[in-house]
Image (cartoon, helix red, strand yellow):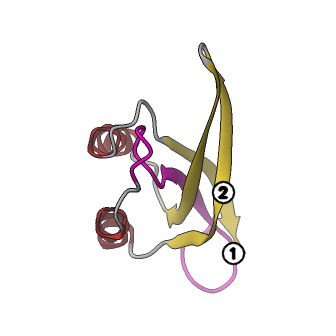
């Protein structure tokens, strides 16, 4: 596919990050911390969309029963999916937010 302007389509990756709004003990994560995470991504990828108006409700099954989180979804487009960078970034954010796992998912998309 063409990667230039004009006619043709451009392939990208749509990356979605589901960030919790609270630590595991229920303490809210500050707007400053969430803002710093957004800023890191904007600096690296040139922009993002944050779906923050109404938190999404995440529910999953664990060994101790149902768990749930309020999450904000960050979405960005990238030309390449740098898997090693994303793995390292996810590990840093998991440690920062004291989470077992932060969901980062990527889908191939075509800009038309």
The residue indicated by pointer 1 is 8
Instruction: Name the quarter where the N terminus is drawn.
Output: bottom right
The number of numbered badges drawn on the structure is 2
List x then y, in percent, for residue 46: 39, 75
SS at circle 2: strand
SS at circle 1: loop
Examine the image and state in which quarter residue 44 appears: bottom left
Measured Cα–Cα span from mark 1 to mark 2: 35 Å
Examine the image and state in which quarter residue 105 appears: top right
Image point (48%, 61%), residue name: 79
Q: Which residues are magenta?
A: 1-27
Query: Can you see residue 15?
Result: no
Location of residue 38 with respect to 17 vertically, above or below: below
Residue 79 is one of the magenta-drawn residues: no
Category of crowding for the residue at label 1, using alpha-carbon neighbours closer than 10 angstroms: few (below 14), some (14–19), many (at least 20):
few
Left or right: 91, with 60 as reference point: left
List x then y, in percent, for residue 77: 53, 65
Examine the image and state in which quarter residue 2 appears: bottom right
Location of residue 67 with respect to 78 vertically, above or below: above
Mark 1 or mark 2, earlier in chain: 1
Left or right: 66, with 37 as reference point: right
* Farthest residue, direction bottom: 6
Left or right: 104, with 60 as reference point: left
Location of residue 54 with respect to 108 vertically, above or below: below
Image point (27%, 45%), residue name: 96
Front-most of residues 59 and 41: 59
List x then y, in percent, for residue 83: 41, 40
Front-most of residues 26 and 50: 26
The residue indicated by pointer 2 is 56
Image point (34%, 63%), residue name: 30
């Amino acid at each position: 596919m063409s990667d230039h302007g004009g006619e043709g389509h451009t392939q990208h990756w749509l990356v979605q990050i589901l960030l919790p709004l609270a630590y595991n003990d229920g303490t809210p994560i500050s707007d400053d911390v969430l803002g710093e995470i957004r800023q890191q991504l904007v600096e690296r990828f040139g922009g993002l969309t944050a779906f923050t108006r109404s938190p999404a409700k995440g529910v999953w099954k664990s060994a101790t029963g149902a768990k749930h989180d309020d999450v904000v979804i960050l979405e960005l487009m990238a030309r390449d999916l740098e898997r090693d960078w994303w793995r390292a970034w996810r590990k840093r954010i998991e440690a920062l937010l004291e989470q077992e796992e932060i969901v980062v998912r990527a889908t191939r998309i075509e800009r038309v």
